[in-house]
Image (cartoon, rainbow, N blue to C red):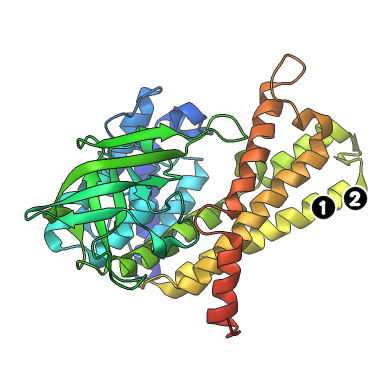
Amino acid sequence: MSDASELENFRADTRTWLDKNCPASMRTPTPEDEVVWGGRNQEWVNPDSKVWMESMAEKGWTVPRWPTQYGGGGLSIDEDRILNEEMRRINARSPLQSFGIWMLGPALLEFASEEQKLHYLPQITRGEIRWYQGYSEPNFGSDLAGLQTRADDKGDYYLVNGSKIWTSYADQSDWIFCLVRTQPDAPKHEGISFLLFDMESEGVDTKPISLISGASPFCQTFFDDVKVPKTQLVGELNKGWTIAKRLLQHERQMVSGIGGNSALGGSGSKMEQLAKEYIGEIDGKIADSAVRSDICEHRMNDKAFQITMSRSVDEAKAGTPDGNLASFFKYYGTEQNKRKYERLLEVMGTGMVGWEGNAFTDREIGSTRQWLRSKANSIEGGTSEVQLNVIAKRVLGLPD
């Protein structure tokens, strides 16, 4: 750990660099059409977004704690914390949103060959590839180990056939990290391998899936005799379940993070402002004491959850994530996010049941769709029932 003087110097240098290099427009809330996912299909609605991402990538700060040889910043936990604090100080946007950063990258750091790390990880840090996950199948969601998409050995390549479902942003992504069955006769949790391949490969097709909330990030992806070079196998052949479990831990920690962000922009005060607008206020306070109490409780739970997650990161240091904690966080975080929108519904009343038309504002229509979308939080990344089973068996030691 760096000593106090070194950390203060790092803070001063970081503050100076951010003040100089973060464009003014990158110090504002991020509109949905300006979120940077990277990849071949990225549209730069705001040119400053590209400047900001490239500047941060050059510093290695799109992934501050990854090793420098793979494009990361090589920061310590304390330095990473300071960087986050200084970015919050100026309300700096995240320069890059990426399943490659949140999910695939940590798995590659642990399981990939050195050649694969040097090839793929720097592209992730620079936002050159947009990745998506190919896990669930039409008949195998929570029972993931029962997957049937096959990859048959054809000498110097695998021939992939099957389909995946709930593949988020598949129609906008460049590459997939995919679980396939390479030994069909093996026991359920064996004979599974972990492949990477380009969405432009011949035989890959995607079809969007509409949700109750309207526009949807989800797709079903089909593979028809897709040729995947063997160099794109990560880890050992038929040992992909080990990688899958680790990646699920990263995914669940990622999904759980939505529960620690209060409504409409991540500030607890936003829900309070909406309550004053829709319910009224007396002496600067929300007029309804029961609603005021509910919002206060929600904000305290948000804060406690954020602190607990931060503490778990500090305790883990640079080690591998604790799978049991990932299940705790995923369960609580998604339930907290769902409660957030239920409270918003109580606050906004009929203003939050609008679908379209001039009778509702854009904010109200957007809130309605977000409320409906939140229902899927307890399904994606492993259902709440699956998380409770993990906690029951691995933490409480309860029998099957």
Amino acid at pointer 2: Ala
**Marking on residue 294:** 1
Q: Are marks 2 and 1 in contact (CB under 8 Å)?
A: yes
| Looking at the image, residue 324 lies above or below residue 275 | below
Give the residue displayed 75% in from the left and 45% down from the top: 342
**Res 199 → quadrant:** top left
Instruction: Pick whichever, 376 or 361, lies toward us.
Output: 376
Inter-mark Cα distance, 2 to 1:
6 Å
Q: Amino acid at mark 1?
A: Asp
Q: Please state which of residues 221 and 33 is positioned toward the viewer in this rendering.
A: 221
- Look at 80% across and 34% down and name the residue there: 348
Residue count near mark 1 (Cα–Cα under 10 Å), binned few <14, some 14–19, many ≥20: few
Asked if residue 80 lies left or right of residue 105, the reply is right
Quarter of the picture holding the C terminus? bottom right
Point out which mark residue 41 bears.
Answer: none
Q: Is residue 269 visible?
A: yes
Q: Residue at the location (62% across, 35% down)?
A: 212
The dot on residue 290 is 2
Q: Position of residue 384 (x, y in %)?
A: 60, 61
At 46% across and 46% down in the image, what residue appears? 87
> For residue 148, what is the image quadrant?
bottom left
Q: Nearer the viewer, residue 41 or 307?
A: 41
Residue 286, image x and y in percent?
Answer: 87, 41
For this orientation, the residue located farthest to the front is: 185
- 327 shown above or below 164: below
Q: Is residue 381 above or below residue 198?
A: below
